[in-house]
Amino acid sequence: MVSAAAARTFDLVIAANRLPVDRHVDPDGTTTWRTSPGGLVTAMESVMHEREAAWVGWAGFPGEAPEAFDDGALRLHPVPLSAEEVTDYYEGFSNDTLWPLYHDVIVPPTFHRSWWHCYRAVNERFADAVAEVAAPGATVWVHDYQLQLVPALLRDQRPDLRIGWFDHIPFPPVELFAQLPWRAPLLRGLIGADFVGFQRPDDARNFIRSCRSVLGATAKGDVVTWQGSDDGHPGSAPRSVRAASVPISIDAAGFRELADRPEVRERAAEIRASLGNPEVVLLGVDRLDYTKGIRHRLRAIEELLADGEIAPPQVTFVQVATPSRERVEAYRTLREQIESTVGRINGDYSHLGDTAVHYLHQSYPREEMAALFQVADIMLVTPLRDGMNLVAKEYVTARHDGGGALVLSEFTGAAEEMRAAYLCNPHDIAGIKETILRAIRDDPAEKQRRMRSLRRRVRTHDVQAWADDFLAALAAAPARPRRRDGP
Ligand code: GDG
């Protein structure tokens, strides 16, 4: 990576909370940058490959930000966050107010005025940083719930820009959204955009209903019109913004190539052998997050073991729970609950050498994830609420040998498209148990038919198609893009 000092401007600018790379300082003091984890970066990495653009985001550590630098064709512009801002804007307002509120209040959201003030200040900093690197008439693509005020803040400074925002997580029904003390300024932030994209049509509808109910905006089809305000706050000018669903996907060709590598296949065989070559391997792969339904899933597994429907060594369950947001209280509590449940289950149902639940609270390289997917006879994706869920799409892509089965929660964005999965209600423990047993026992030909259909869907709606659809919708907004199959 080359350090670049001159203030160049770009026709395409991405703004996301995090840069796509993380800083690592080696023991000898040398700094390297490696791809940072998470759904957003995984998706955007392949889309941005070789595109000339700027990416504005936080570098992942508090204090002064490094100078802008190049990463291939991408120019990375780090935005600084102080330690207090990491606590109040990121861990606080983003992950302890908005995240639970937007995920069906699975845990109660925390509302603090000081967090909101900090969120606003950080969004202003992001808007300023984008304004600096955006060329006249540039396209700006803002990502996710951490930056919902950026569209209007940017519009006020740079009316020449085309601004889009994509919501990676659900947008809540107005009945929940209305709890937010800052619901009006937040919506005004978003309607500064020309186009706002969501994972599901329901998310887009929830947004439109919120604009009508909270702001008194009008809506015609999927275009929201707001008459503006004379209160002088950011985003006061009249606006029209289009809201529609553009479901995200994965780099299907890239992931298939990865899963096909001989070393990945060898590793899959090695993992299976190290588990004692069970007849059925059940697998869960999630960030350790209360939205992912890990506790409900473990409850279903525990009952299946208690009922004698499954037992090690013939059937074993592997749960990868990637460390996440470990400084937020709700995540620490969840980790304790999960680990005590796993301990109890293994105490009751494992034998020497035969483990009922293999629990891994670690991060792995992508090759290891692909190998694990190949080992999984039944993949359990059972979130209580999830914007999309890329793991479901990665799993079916990795299993192009035709094996495997996907148990998928109805409350994921993925369930809208992946109707051929074994769908379940993640709140219904009896239902999860039945669905797991059905997925284990179904006729292999039926399972293959389902997997074929799922793979086809992901292959034909990959991440490149998602990015093209989003950018086409943004270019045409507030009209619909002319392409027949556009969103
Ligand atoms: C948000 C929304 C939406 C996980 N552990 C490891 C690892 N991963 C990778 C997975 C997958 C990604 O991280 C997780 O993506 P998800 O979609 O499952 O979930 P979120 O992180 O919650 O993402 C979600 C997404 O944004 C995109 O819009 O789908 O609904 O919540 O790619 O494979 N990757 C590696 N090691 C791990 O240990 N290398």
Image (tube, rainbow, N blue to C red):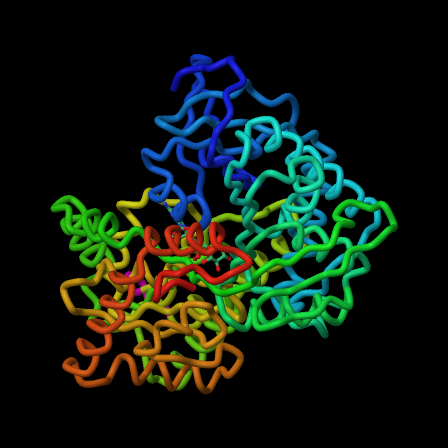
Residue in the foreground of this view, choosing between 95 and 299: 95
* Residue at (76, 57) in percent of width and height: 110
Give the x, y percent position of residue 485: 35, 66
In the image, farthest residue toward the left: 262
Image quadrant containing the N terminus: top left
**Which corner quadrant of the image does residue 34 belong to?**
top left
Which residue is located at x 45 percent, y 69 percent?
345
Q: Where 218 sits versus 197, above or below?
A: below
User: Residue at position x 14%, y 64% from top?
Assistant: 401
Tell me, yes or no, whether the highlighted magenta stretch contains residue 286. no
Where is residue 109 shown, x and y percent of the image?
72, 61
Considering only vertical position in the picture, is 220 above or below 287? below
Q: Is residue 75 above or below residue 236?
A: above
Residue 72, quarter of picture? top left
**Relative horizontal placement of residue 379, taking residue 33 as reference (left or right):** left
Residue 462, above or below 439: above
Q: Nearer the viewer, residue 311 or 324?
A: 324
Give the residues in magenta.
350-354
Q: Position of residue 286 (x, y in %)?
A: 44, 58
Give the dominant element type of the magenta stretch: helix, strand or loop.
Answer: loop
Instruction: Please give the count of numbered marks on the rendered protein.
Output: 0
Name which residue lies at 46% across and 68% down. Answer: 413
Q: Is residue 255 left or right of residue 469?
A: left
Q: Quadrant of the C terminus?
A: bottom left
Task: Pick whichever, 468 or 329, lies toward us.
Answer: 468
Percent position (x, y) of residue 329? Answer: 68, 52
Q: Is residue 59 left or right of residue 382?
A: right
